[in-house]
Amino acid sequence: MNCTEIHDEFSALLDGELSGEARVRIEAHIAKCEDCRRALDKMKRVDAMYRALDPLTAPAGFEKPIQAAIREKHPGQVQTARPAWRWRLAWAAAAACAAIVVAVGILRREPDTERFNVASIEQKSEPSEPRRIVQEHDAGKWQTAPTMDTAVPMALPSPSPTESTGDQGPESMPFKDLAVSIPQQSAVKESRKGEASESAPVAPPPPAAMESGEVKMPASEPAAAPPPAERESRKAKMPSSAPVTPPTSPVEIPPPSIAAEGNQDDLPVQTALVPPESTAPASVDNEEAIDAGHDPTRKKKAIADELVMPTNKLGFGPITFGLGLKKTDKRHVGMAAPLENDKRDMAVPEKTKTAKDVSPDRGDRKIVAERAFLRIGDAWVEDGYPQDAPTRILRRGSKACKAFFDKHSELKPLLELDGRIVFTFDKRWYRIEPAKKSD
Amino acid sequence: MTLFREARMQTDAGLVEECRAGDASAFDEIVRRYKDRVYRVVYRFLGNHEDALDVAQETFIRAYGGIREFRGSAQLCTWLHSIAANLARNRLRDGSRKGRNQGVPLNGMDPADDCSPRTSAERQELEDTLQRCLLELPEPYRMAFVLRTFDDLNYETIAQTLGIPVGTVKSRINHARRLLRERLEELAIV
């Protein structure tokens, strides 16, 4: 290998690209050849000088034209940087779904559980305040009655009108207690399986309710007679003197299963109002008459009429507070679940008419801004509030609340209601919570 | 999931996959990771900041447009350098037609003007001289030498980048060094 050939291998030698044998051979030559060694040293110096040049870096803002050009040349393909919140949002959504699944699973595990969000309103009831779900209508006498064919069988106690307005029970019932009553109603339904032929089942209030003094009634009034099968099933639960109900008093009646539940005797059941002038179909069994008091025939007819015709005679369908539970519709508790007919009756003109007909200030019920509100504990709940409707909570005095009512000024009259307010707007349910205490 | 993505973002292949999936942030990472290397090579090859900046940016723009065609058989840096080399060569030819990037002819350099690199100014002048000498190299030699010297690529990678045999790479680099040595000897720098 001559010097020229050795020079051709200098770069490879410097860069470590030579194999072991070639390197040994070249190094041996360089060790002996002064010219080659000197040439190699100069090449090393040159290479070192160039490697020592300033290590350039791209100037600031190098990426911006690239990003702009990419957006321009490939519109639609460029995404913004995938932010971490997208993953967080995905995880949050997954967690929410999991929570919903778990919640649904828990709810379904409870037998015949019917819940309603009214219970979520943490109502602090006042012991002295009787809880009344239904009020008399100003225009006429109202009766309590189930409004649907699957209404909870019950007997309506028959306190006197004066008693019904002021002393229906020793305590008002908190929502959570009311919620507890729903499975009891369902339990009644369960107990009534096989009694489909009974179109208007009624049952007397449980003894527990009577013992609690929640429903006051004349002891002399005869008890409502449940169907035979039901009488059998409730023989152990029924008091000897069944309660009776005056035809004009809406009252709260604990479901029969309350007695079976033991210590839940203070749980009333909402009842529906039936105008006394309703006519009952002839097929109604007299044994199922609710009221054996003042006018059992009329009462029975009224109840039967409600059962056959769920729509309220006075066009006040939505305000059928009480036993308007449809067996298959567990969403509506506390207030009557509107049937299809009722929904038609809930059209705005009808509701407006009703609002005019009904006294706006009846203590337990108010009409505000053409909306019917029911007093439940310390809350005013708009009619039609379904049990599973999520509520958006607004707190009085908060910025969000102010902004909401400023935006929807037509709703401002609702704020005149005291306490909590549950109302619907734009297919959503809202709950106005009292303002936070400053202390 | 984020960790998985971050792990993918650690590798060039993962970045390419993320970029193919439409994640612009992955391409931003590619740019961030290779912009200095590409710019450095292009600048040393062209010797002009504006042209180097244009070519380097265009390199990444072209890369984004062709990222779906990038098979991944070669390294990402090799692919980027090949794009940059082609663009730089094209720019050099365009500049030659326009009378740009001619550099300072080595023959036109007066050895008497050379100064020893003792001061910063002298060092800057030396760098300019070295750059001018580099620009006088024939383009094939220059590119191979630049890739080897300023990006420390091995011969195999340079061969892949330029699409030439490894032996050709070795020859080009060796010729480049020999020419540079001779010119710097003339300038009494070495």
Image (spheres, grey):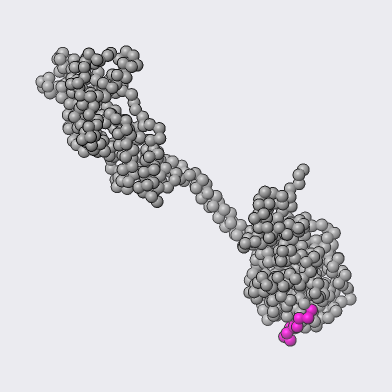
Q: Which residue is drawn at 38% across and 50% down?
A: A75
Q: In which quarter of the image is residue B57?
A: top left
Closer to us: A338 or A415: A415
Q: Does the magenta stretch include residue A282?
A: yes
Instruction: Identify the image quadrant of the N terminus of chain A.
Output: top left
Judged left or right of residue A195, residue B106 is left
Q: Is the magenta stretch mostly helix, strand or loop?
A: loop
A82 within the magenta span: no
Residue B59, image x, y percentages: 31, 39
From the viewer's perspective, tell me whether residue A9 is left or right of residue A142: left
Residue A339: in sight, yes or no?
no
Q: Farthest residue toward the bottom?
A: A282
The residue that appears at 23% across and 37% down in the rendered structure is: B94
Between residue A394 and residue A115, name the one nearer to us: A394
The spot of residue A190 in percent (x, y) is: 68, 71
Relative to the observer, which residue lies in front, A354 or A295? A354
Q: Give the range drawn in magenta.
A: A276-285
The relative height of residue A346 versus residue A5 in the rendered view (above or below) is below
Residue B144 versus residue A210 in the image, above or below: above
Identify the residue at horizontal 18%, vertical 21% (top origin).
B107
Q: Which of A96 and A211 is in front in this view?
A: A96
Q: Position of residue B77 (x, y in %)?
A: 31, 37
Determine the image quadrant of residue B158: top left
Residue A162 higher or lower than B131, as above or below: below
| Residue farthest along the left direction in this orientation | A2
Q: Is residue A3 visible?
A: yes
Identity of the residue drawn at 84% across and 68% down = A165
